[in-house]
Image (cartoon, rainbow, N blue to C red):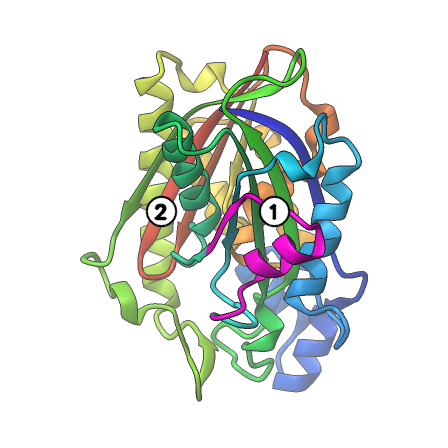
């Protein structure tokens, strides 16, 4: 399948390490050494997840090579929905008057966007759909607790939108060569490692296990998809890992034997923007990609879950 257009929305407000240091009586350096994060994107009261998603789609529509009404599938991927009945997928359908599309919401923690891509690809292969819109967004600040020393300092807010088609719509479009996802609820602390319950909010009580499993599976899935498609690590132009922690990304690059300058990131400025994070980095850097580039997105999320995709610029 092919990527026709991309768009994103990132709140302008940034929350610094200084804020958390004062709030929790810790040093700014304490936060940076453990995460590599300097600031986080924080949505205002007006910047709801629906608002951010609409803005991301508006951004993507600017360069869309067909009318948005041609879209026949809308997938909203998130773990921090505003509403699980009137979902953001349906809000987008109404806002842009997309008459003849299937629309639904999926969640598999921070791997939700890659799961969404896999679903879209399956719909394309089965001829159920030919043009699709994926919106991936998380408004972590709706559920996180800044006073939570374990994980309250990690979270950011953002949205990204990607349009896909089963056939190329114009020359030189990026092609998704392969996608693979995996549920990992049976490993480590699994579903207990990261939780978001109605009364308790978003928490990560077993951060060390999350760190360990993320390093293992981001490395394993990236290596596997590259080899499966006949490439080697040296053929990879850019690696985009889940933007949870800069130390995780550095560890994965080391295990893969990949130069860190091949790893594209935004976690330093935006924090962990959830399932939007890896596709958001992709969208932000889209203009630097050139013909022949091979890009791998690899993500790991609570639950546990993981996913990877390989993209070639033709």
Q: Indicate yes or no whether the magenta region holds residue 100.
A: yes
What numbered label is drawn on residue 306?
2
Classify the position of the C terminus by image quarter: top right
Residue 237 percent across, percent down from the top left: 56, 20
Task: Tell me whether circle 2 and circle 1 mark residues in contact (CB < 8 Å).
Answer: no
Dividing the picture into quarters, in which one does residue 272 lie?
Answer: bottom right
Residue 113 percent across, percent down from the top left: 48, 47
Residue 196 percent across, percent down from the top left: 42, 75
Q: Is residue 44 left or right of residue 122?
A: right
10 Å neighbourhood of mark 2: few (<14), some, or many (≥20)? Answer: many
Residue displayed at 76% across by 47% down? 58
- From which residue to which does the magenta span run? 85-104
Residue displayed at 39% across by 34% down? 123
- Looking at the image, the residue that sits furthest to the left is 186
Name the residue carrying label 1: 99
**Residue 15 versus residue 252 in the image, above or below:** below
Q: First in sequence, mark 2 or 1: give its number.
A: 1
Q: Secondary structure at mark 1?
A: loop
What numbered label is drawn on residue 202?
none
Residue 204 in sight here: yes
Instruction: Depth check: give the residue in front, 298 or 108.
Output: 108
Q: Across the whole image, how many numbered discs are drawn on residues? A: 2
Q: Is residue 6 left or right of residue 155?
A: right
Q: Indicate yes or no whether the magenta region holds residue 69.
A: no
Residue displayed at 39% across by 15% down? 232
């Amino acid at each position: 399948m092919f990527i026709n257009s991309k768009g994103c929305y990132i709140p302008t407000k940034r929350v610094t390490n200084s804020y958390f240091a004062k709030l929790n009586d810790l040093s700014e350096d304490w936060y940076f050494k453990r995460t590599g994060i300097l600031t986080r994107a924080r949505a205002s009261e007006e910047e709801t997840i629906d608002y951010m998603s609409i803005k991301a789609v508006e951004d993507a529509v600017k360069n869309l090579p067909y009318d948005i009404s041609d879209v026949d599938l809308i997938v909203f991927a998130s773990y921090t929905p505003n509403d699980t009945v009137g979902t953001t997928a349906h809000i987008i359908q109404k806002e842009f008057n997309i008459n003849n599309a299937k629309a639904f919401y999926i969640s598999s923690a921070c791997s939700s966007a890659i799961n969404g891509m896999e679903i879209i690809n399956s719909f394309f292969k089965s001829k159920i759909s030919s043009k699709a819109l994926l919106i991936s967004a998380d408004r972590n600040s709706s559920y996180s607790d800044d006073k939570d020393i374990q994980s309250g300092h990690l979270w950011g807010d953002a949205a990204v939108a990607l349009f896909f088609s089963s056939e190329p719509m114009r020359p030189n479009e990026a092609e998704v060569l392969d996608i693979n996802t995996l549920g990992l609820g049976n490993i480590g602390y699994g579903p207990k490692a990261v939780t978001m319950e109605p009364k308790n909010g978003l928490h990560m009580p077993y951060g060390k296990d999350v760190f360990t499993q993320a390093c293992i599976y981001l490395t394993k899935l990236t290596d596997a998809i590259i080899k499966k498609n006949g490439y080697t690590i040296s053929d990879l132009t850019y690696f985009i890992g889940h933007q949870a922690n800069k130390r995780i990304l550095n560890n994965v690059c080391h295990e893969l034997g990949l130069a860190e300058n091949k790893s594209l990131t935004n976690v330093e400025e935006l924090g962990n923007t959830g399932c939007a994070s890896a596709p958001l980095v992709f969208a932000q850097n889209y203009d630097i990609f050139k013909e022949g580039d091979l890009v791998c997105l690899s993500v790991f999320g609570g639950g546990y879950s993981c996913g990877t995709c390989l993209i070639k610029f033709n």
